[in-house]
């Protein structure tokens, strides 16, 4: 990760002012002892001579002794002064070093604590720093990244490597660019990256810094907010339009029936006239069905909460859809986890959601295929959930269409009205659940619905296929 926090040794904990004081006192004591010894020599001289003439040979020895004492005293004073100066210098050095380590520690703690991933790369392309958030976002440990070239850490063709190439080799930087990233666990995420030049102490370029944030959940939340805003804006409009159109549509339908009765009263209708009437009646019925969807979308009605047995609901849906599946050459598979808890909700509305999803799966397999319906227990946010998935082997959905699937009146089918999934989304939201779609063009689609499970003992469901 970063430079580790230095360990304190025993000698570093000794007060340096105490060392300097001891050295100074020692120097003063030695100097005092030497001076005292010199004074003792002076006092002993009269006792040695005892009023006799002092031998001439004694003077050089005394002077030599005094010079030696002075030299030794001066040396001890110098050593003490040097030691004192060295202690003071070392004290300043250690204080500066500890300040520097404190600054480094603060920077280290900041980088470890910020919720943004930070990755630094030197001019040679070697990764020099990785903070814990970057490890979590990139799904890589610091041991796999630090000291390695970014070209070996990220495979050729990865979006993040191309961004680093542009920043380091071509000096082209990005700001808040969303990239699709697939970690070693094969999970697909969206990360938002920014790059900038990293300067050294001399002010020259020393590398590149990359900041990364995992915005997968943010984008999903933004999408849900956008859909919710559109739903809220269209609720009133849909109710008003449906109400205003229902009366003239009813009048048209009634008058068409009267016209047909009057025309057939005088004999059989010409084939062309019969065809026109048939088309008009069919279009009136289609408009009536669209208005019914409008009303469901605008006012889905009160939810009558009761326990819903998912296994029993699955069996009902399979019975309902089996004939159409056989006509389309589609095999229906059902799997319900044993001991699955019931969900609290409206069985009719939940069934409508599942039927809409299964019908969409059928339409995605024009040449036949397999539709798998499964249900199991999941734990999320500390609460039990029942997760229902509908997986098909159809044509899949384009990435640009995925983000708009739950928008009202948006459809990829030529004859669709774009309200089926919007109504399903509304019903799931009203139940306090979640709905998500994952798809790869040419490889099929999986729709996942999560509903809160009942909080008491689970009922016994069966497992079937």
Image (cartoon, helix red, strand yellow):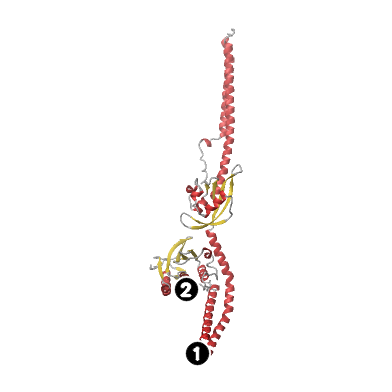
* Residue under the image location 58 percent in, 30 percent down: 84
Q: Residue furthest bottom?
A: 266
Q: Pick the quarter of the image with the C terminus.
A: bottom left
Please tell me whether mark 1 sits on a helix, a strand or a loop.
loop
Count of number-bearing discs: 2
Dot placed on the residue nearer the N-terminal end, 1 or 2: 1
**Residue 24: in sight, yes or no?**
no
Q: Which residue is mark 2?
A: 348
Label placed on residue 114: none
- Nearer to us in this view, 222 or 201: 201
Q: Residues within 10 Å of mark 1 (few under 14, many from 20)?
A: few
Q: Residues within 10 Å of mark 2 (few under 14, many from 20)?
A: few
Q: Name the residue at the right extreme.
A: 203
Where, by quadrant of the figure, is residue 18 drawn?
top right
Q: Nearer the viewer, mark 1 or mark 2?
A: 1
Q: CA distance from mark 1 to mark 2?
A: 44 Å
Image coordinates for residue 119, horizontal then vertical, percent? 54, 49
Query: Looking at the picture, how far across and down is residue 284, in whole percent?
Result: 54, 80
In the image, 178 versus 155, the foreground residue is 155
Q: Is residue 253 visible?
A: yes
Residue 44's place in the image compared with 465, above or below, is: above
Q: Which residue is mark 1?
A: 268
Q: Nearer the viewer, residue 177 or 264?
A: 264
Q: State if disc 2 and disc 1 touch (CB < 8 Å).
A: no
Across and down, in percent, residue 430 comes to: 52, 69
Up the image or down, 299 lies above or below 103; here it is below
Q: Name the secondary structure under disc 2.
A: helix
Residue 407 position by quadrant: bottom right
Q: Position of residue 249 (x, y in %)?
A: 56, 81
Identified at 57% across, 41% down, the residue is 100
User: 254 or 26, which is in the foreground?
Assistant: 254
């Amino acid at each position: 990760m970063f430079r580790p926090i230095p360990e304190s040794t025993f000698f570093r904990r000794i007060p340096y002012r105490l060392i300097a004081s001891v050295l100074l006192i020692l120097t003063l004591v030695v100097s005092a002892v030497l001076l005292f010894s010199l004074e003792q020599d002076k006092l002993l001289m009269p006792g040695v001579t005892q009023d006799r003439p002092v031998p001439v040979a004694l003077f050089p020895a005394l002077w030599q002794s005094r010079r030696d004492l002075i030299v030794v005293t001066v040396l001890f004073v110098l050593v003490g002064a040097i030691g004192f100066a060295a202690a003071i210098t070392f004290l300043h050095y250690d204080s500066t070093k500890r300040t520097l380590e404190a600054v480094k520690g603060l920077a280290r703690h900041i980088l470890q604590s910020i919720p943004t991933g930070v990755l630094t790369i030197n001019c040679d392309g070697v990764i020099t720093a990785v903070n814990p958030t970057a490890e979590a976002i990139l799904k890589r440990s610091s041991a796999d990244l630090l000291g390695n070239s970014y070209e070996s850490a990220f495979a050729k063709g990865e979006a993040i490597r191309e961004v680093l190439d542009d920043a380091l080799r071509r000096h082209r930087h990005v700001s808040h660019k969303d990239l699709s990233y697939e970690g070693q666990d094969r999970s697909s995420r969206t990360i938002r990256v920014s790059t900038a030049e990293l300067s050294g102490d001399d002010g020259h370029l020393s590398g590149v810094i990359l900041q990364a944030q995992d915005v997968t959940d943010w984008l999903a939340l933004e999408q849900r907010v956008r859909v919710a805003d559109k739903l809220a804006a269209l609720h009133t409009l849909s109710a008003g339009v449906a109400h205003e159109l229902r009366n003239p549509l009813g009048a048209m339908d009634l008058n068409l029936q009267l016209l047909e009765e009057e025309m057939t009263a005088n004999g059989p209708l010409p084939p062309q006239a019969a065809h026109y009437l048939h088309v008009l009646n069919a279009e009136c019925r289609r408009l009536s069905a669209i208005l019914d969807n409008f009303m469901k979308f605008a006012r889905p009605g009160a939810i009558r909460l009761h326990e819903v047995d998912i296994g029993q609901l699955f069996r009902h849906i399979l019975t309902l859809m089996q004939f159409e599946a056989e006509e389309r050459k589609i095999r229906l598979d059902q799997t319900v986890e044993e001991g699955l808890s019931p969900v609290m909700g409206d069985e009719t509305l939940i069934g409508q959601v599942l039927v809409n999803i299964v019908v969409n799966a059928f339409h995605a397999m024009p040449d036949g295929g397999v539709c798998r319906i499964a249900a199991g227990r999941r734990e999320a946010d500390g609460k039990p959930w029942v997760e229902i998935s509908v997986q098909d082997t159809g044509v899949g959905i384009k990435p640009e269409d995925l983000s708009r699937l739950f928008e009202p009146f948006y459809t990829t089918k030529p004859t669709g009205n774009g309200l089926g999934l919007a109504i399903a989304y509304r019903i799931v939201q009203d139940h306090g659940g979640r709905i998500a779609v994952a798809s790869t063009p040419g490889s099929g689609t999986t729709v996942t619905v999560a509903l809160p499970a009942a909080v008491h003992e689970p009922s016994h469901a069966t497992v079937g296929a």
